[in-house]
Image (cartoon, rainbow, N blue to C red):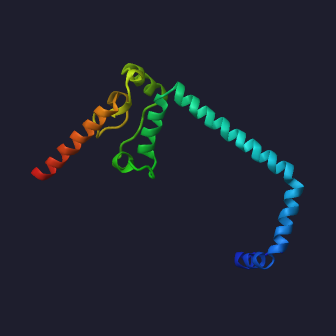
Amino acid sequence: MSYNDPEKQKEWVKNNRDKVNKIAKKSYEKNREKILEKAKNNLEYKQRQKDRRIKERKNKPWIQHLYSARARCNNKNHKSYKYYGGRGIKCDLTRTEIEFLWFRDKAYLMEKPSLDKKDNNWHYILENCRFIELVDNIKKSNIDRQFRTTLDYTI
């Protein structure tokens, strides 16, 4: 069976379901060991990747803040992209810079550290970023939002 037309091919498969199942079963039996080995290796690989990510988050907690900032600026599917990347804000922080900020601001002593931009209209760069408590960051964003709303009404 070699059909160039996908519609004809689908119709043939539909009409010859038993043949297709027989061929698939033979192929599986013939290659069972290879298939199972490949699946096992894939699961082991995924588990190693997961373990590595967990270890990295534990040993380097600042990394997740960097990944989140990059996602807000670069990933168009991120829920906050319109407030960051959509406004032209870029994340120019490196791993070493975020680590420096983490220790400079003593984020390891904070209950829930949060990466904050001093000037919300500027990029994520070393000079514009700091770690503060999440509660303070939320308060700051609410104050900014209220201030912007009052400006809209006064203009």
Q: Closest to the observer: 152 or 40?
A: 40
Residue occupying the point 74% across, 79% down = 11
Q: State left or right for residue 147 relative to residue 65.
A: left
Locate residue 50: give its quadrant.
top right
Residue 38 lies, with reference to residue 52, above or below; the image says below
Q: From this viewpoint, is residue 22 visible?
A: yes
Q: Is residue 39 above or below residue 48?
A: below
Q: Residue at x 28, y 40 (%)?
A: 121
Residue 127: x and y, percent?
A: 34, 27
Looking at the rendered image, the quarter that the N terminus falls into is bottom right
Return the x and y of residue 105 as percentages of the image width and height: 36, 22
Where, by quadrant of the figure, is residue 126 drawn? top left
Give the number of callouts: 0
Residue sitting nearer the eye, 148 or 146:
146
Q: Is residue 132 left or right of residue 76?
A: left
Q: Residue at x 81, y 77 (%)?
A: 16
Residue 124 position, x and y percent, is 37, 35
Residue at (45, 45) in percent of width and height: 74
As displayed, is residue 100 above or below residue 23? above
